[in-house]
Image: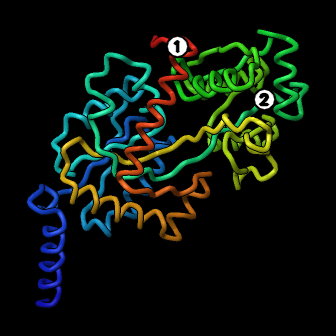
Amino acid sequence: MQFHTTRRAFLAAGTACAFGGSALAQGKPITIIVPYSPGGSADIATRVIAQFAAPGVGLPMIVDNRTGGGGVVGWGAASRAAPDGQTLLTVELSYAIAAGLLPKLPFDPRKAFTQVTTAVKVPHVLVVNPGVPAKTVQEFIALAKAQPGKLNYGSGGNGTNTHLAGELFKSVTGADIMHVPYKGAGAVLTDLMSNQVQALITSVPTALPHIRAGKLKPLMVTGAERNLLLPDVPSAKEAGIPKMDMDYWIGIGAPAGTPQAIIDKLNKEINASLLQPEARKKIAEMGFTVVANTPAQAAQFVASEIQRWSAVIQQAGIKPE
């Protein structure tokens, strides 16, 4: 009994030293705000991180889904949290897009958060209805150019990653395809499979079940390399469109001003958790690959993504609804 009591005291002291005088030293759970509903890629990946990182951090890690406003509610709540490491945020591609799309966010997206790590990434995939007479992406581009404005691509809504993916595709290929926005990915997929729209560029996990069922035809993954879950589908680089390099990525951020010692500790433990065999297996099954970079690399990456998508939004003349 004495041994266990002493051991608990030692662990608590170790945690306190690691986090200095912050609230984390008092043994309170860490909350990770996910600005989307349970069940999506961001939510599932965050739950894997919370499960496997908590033992190393030495504190429980709780996922809190704060939905609304396409992410704005969750981002805003995290931006107002105390910078003590007690509250973290799941930062992903939509955050970088919103920074260039929504001029009246209740926080500065370029300054509100310190990045802890870019955890995982997965490419998008260009899928078309099986009835589209194109076996390759180059044939699809030729078809679109031969029939300007006749082919439609769907998206989950104005300014979403699926919308921006389509606009990036148009800008780097010159394909003349029309945008049809929907209220969410599910509605797009339904109409795509019934040929109401002909194409969609979405993350691999979203499209994979329908590809495997033969209901969608994949033409290209949007990365420099092929995806392990779609080994027969060429990469954008192989397809001759290297600028169509687009990942759906998920990272962890903390409110700006969080002490660097806390950021570094969280980075170390989260990255280590992502490399555990069981965690890697779960992540791979989702189609993701582990990134696990440094806080400085994560900050540079998010800044570059904000700059990149702001340019696409401006070029395409996309306005918030």
Image quadrant in which you'd find residue 245 = top right
The local crowd at label 2, few if under 14, some if 14 to 19, many if 20 or more residues have their Cα within 10 Å, is many
Q: Quadrant for the N terminus, please.
A: bottom left
| Residue where numbered disc 1 is placed | 318
Q: Is residue 69 left or right of residue 265?
A: right
Report how far apart the C-alphas of labels 1 and 2 lie in the structure: 24 Å
User: Callout 2, which amino acid?
Assistant: Val
Q: Is residue 85 left or right of residue 271?
A: left
The residue depicted at 79 percent of the width and 45 percent of the height is 233
| Residue where numbered disc 2 is placed | 128
Q: Are marks 1 and 2 in contact (CB under 8 Å)?
A: no
The residue depicted at 88 percent of the width and 14 percent of the height is 146
Above or below, comparing residue 204 to residue 191 in the picture: below
Residue 313 horizontal/vertical position (percent): 52, 19
Front residue of 151 and 211: 151
Q: Looking at the image, is mark 1 or mark 2 nearer the viewer?
A: 1
User: Callout 1, which amino acid?
Assistant: Ile
Judging from the image, what secondary structure is the residue with disc 2 in? strand
The residue depicted at 27 percent of the width and 55 percent of the height is 263
Image quadrant in which you'd find residue 268 = bottom left
The residue depicted at 76 percent of the width and 19 percent of the height is 175
Residue 182 horizontal/vertical position (percent): 59, 18
Judging from the image, what secondary structure is the residue with disc 1 in? loop
Q: Is residue 256 left or right of residue 195?
A: left
Front residue of 105 and 257: 257
Above or below, comparing residue 230 to residue 157 in the picture: below
> Going from the N terminus, do you reach mark 1 or mark 2 first?
2
Residue 129's label in the rendered image is none
Front residue of 222 and 281: 222
